[in-house]
Image: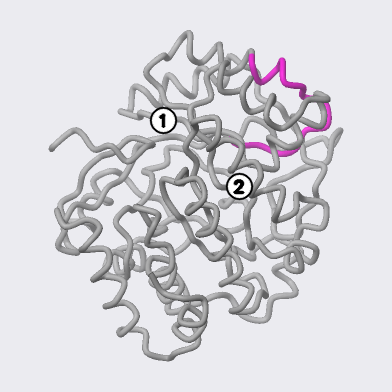
Amino acid sequence: MITRKQALELLADPDLIGVGMEADALRRSLHPEGVVTYIIDRNINYTNVCTEYCSFCAFYRPHGHPESYVLPLETIFEKIQETVELGGTGILMQGGLHPELEIGWYEELLRGIKKRFPQVWLHCFSAPEILNIAEVSGLSLRDTIARLRDAGLDSIPGGGAEILDDEVRRRISRLKCTTGEWLQVHRTAHKLGMRTTATMMFGCGETLEQRVNHLERVRNLQEETGGFTAFIPWTFQPENTSLGRTIKEEASAVEYLKTLAVSRLFLSSISNVQSSWVTQGLKTCQVGLRFGANDVGSVMIEENVVAAAGARNRATEEELRRIIRDAGFVPRQRDTLYRTFFLH
């Protein structure tokens, strides 16, 4: 496990290959079987109504906007049916922070899905969404998560983290939850026996030190609870966003690979690190498998949020299996908790 000082030095060091080799060696020790995993799931964005107005988001619409929506439950069920027919095992469901949807709506949704599709794993609702549900419903955070869990929520994604540094958060998402609040949602979920993931969106004008602040806060919580299954870094997608107009230079593929490698080295207590094809494209994603990553994420039958900000990469299951094989690994389908199956 590297120190904070070492992480900063590696991020600033021009030696890309050196840090990549170190991360690859750690990946080999954590995953000696030479397998790289992927999941078939769908990202259902149940509403685009949001009150936070984050400057990096091109997806949200204000309440009452002519383009705002809340998907009917039947539409969500149809999307899940299609996912199951395509071999999907999980649903990642996220939306905006709707000012009127109380917990009863979410409980009805989760129970309805579990009744129809008991085999589907529900990995849903980012920390800001859960905090919003608690606020709108007049409930404590713990009671909100416990009720969602009892209605069918299986695990919680890491969305809404961006950079876990309040100076950055005030600049890019002034109304969104604080670093402490994001961490408290995940801490509470872990204490209630749920697993979650951690994410990082970088390249939004933060310093290297603020990037390491993020990694350190994730590591500290993992050491406290052990509840994170994976860490997923990706780069800010500037197109169609107000923040994009203020960023002088997008994070490069080199910067992505270096940050991925340093994340693997710094977060050795988190088993899985994901290389992103959605934001980076298939080629860079493939190179990331030699920079510490052991997973390429999801075939992702549907995704709207990052796509709205300009990421247009698409991939089939066979394409993901091909890039894994071509990088020298055995491709294997997994579930949301990184349990592998389907040895084809």
Alpha-carbon distance for marks 2 and 1? 18 Å
* Image quadrant where one finds the C terminus: top left
Give the SS element for disc 2.
helix
Residue at the bottom extreme of this rendering = 14
Image quadrant of residue 336? top left
Do the numbered discs 2 and 1 sit on residues whose CB atoms are within 8 Å? no
Query: What residue appears at the point 69 percent right and 37 percent down from the top-left corner?
Result: 129
* Whether residue 252 is situated above or below residue 108 in the rendered picture: below
In this picture, which residue range is highlighted in magenta?
A: 94-107
Report the quarter where the N terminus lies.
Answer: bottom left
The residue lying at 43 percent from left, 62 percent from top is 267
Amino acid found under the numbered disc labelled 2: Val
Between discs 2 and 1, the one toward the N terminus: 1
Structural crowding at the residue carrying mark 1, measured as other residues with C-alpha within 10 Å and reported as few (<14), some (14–19) or many (≥20): many
Looking at the image, which residue is at 68% across and 35% down?
130
Q: Please indicate whether residue 339 sits to the left or right of residue 209 in the image.
A: left
Does 103 appear in magenta?
A: yes
Q: Residue at x 27, y 47 (%)?
A: 37
Q: Residue furthest right?
A: 64
Whole-percent x, y for residue 312 in the image: 49, 55
Disc 1 designates what residue?
90
Percent x, y for residue 325?
Answer: 16, 57
Secondary element under disc 1, as helix, strand or loop, is strand
Q: How is the image coloured?
A: one colour
Quarter holding residue 310 = bottom right
Which residue does the numbered mark 2 point to in the structure image? 305
- Image depth: mark 2 or mark 1 in front: 1
